[in-house]
Amino acid sequence: MQKLASLVPSMRQAILIHIIAAMKKTAFILLLSILAYTSQAQRPGFTYIKDDAAVRQKLSAGSKAINAIKADFTQEKELSMLSEKIVSKGAFFFKKENKVRLEYKTPFKYLMVINGSKVLIKDDTKSTKYDTHSNKIFKQVNDLIISSVQGTILNSPDFKVKIYESSGQYLLEMVPVAKGLKEFFSGINILIDKKDYSVSRLEMVELSGDKTTISFSNKELNGKVDDTLFSTN
């Protein structure tokens, strides 16, 4: 019994480490796709757009019109090792050019900031800084953010994209083909509101089978966003 009891903290620590790692993956891919705009199966309520040139133009124009974003988000993480979903909540901020803040508030505090080529990652125990020029993964993130702001993400060679639509939303089914992304995810689905071309929900499926869904609420577009939120010092 004593040996079994001693294993409990280790098990809890292992689960916590897994959750933190999952949050890092989520933050990474969110930065790739929140500014932009996968299904082999049918999509109830959505129709596949075979000739999507006009829609791509609309999404490109919509992304260019967004200069700043403030939003709340709720993340649901389904892990293969846990029977219950892990629910996290936080705030997201974006400001041109190339400034992003992803802040988890509950149940764990976790922060990722991108400001130009500088990246800050912070949790309860430590802060880590990166320069995208010297880190291949974050360089890829930085390049994709720029292409998203410019409205060219749908032309990115890193993804194969199919576009679906319903009465009020577009659905982007994105299958990563770039080596770095393929090592993390099998597919990414992005739901975009037609009224303002902002992301309403993000779904990610990892190679392990773990699934993450992030829903955005209280979105404010092109409002005032203080530059101090993007400090990497």
Image (cartoon, helix red, strand yellow):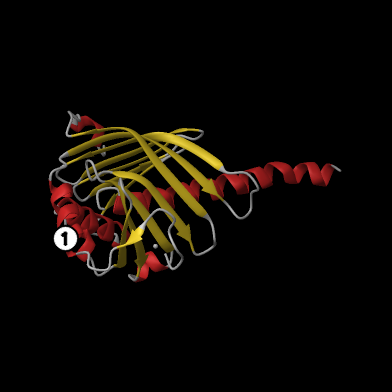
Q: Please state if 127 lies on the left or on the right of 68 as rendered.
A: right
Above or below, comparing residue 215 to residue 46 in the picture: above
Image coordinates for residue 210, horizontal then vertical, percent: 53, 56
Q: Which residue is mark 1?
A: 54
> In front here: 114 or 77?
77
Image coordinates for residue 11, horizontal then vertical, percent: 68, 47
Above or below, comparing residue 193 to residue 148 in the picture: above
Above or below, comparing residue 30 to residue 154 in the picture: above
Task: In the displayed orientation, state which residue is furthest to the right.
Answer: 1
- Residue depicted at 15% across the width and 40% down the height: 67
- Whether residue 228 is visible to the viewer of this picture, yes or no, is yes
Q: Which amino acid is tagged 1? A: Ala
Quarter of the image where one finds residue 157: bottom left
- Residue depicted at 44% across the width and 63% down the height: 42
**Badge 1: residue crowd in 10 Å (few <14, some 14–19, many ≥20):** few
> In front here: 172 or 97?
172
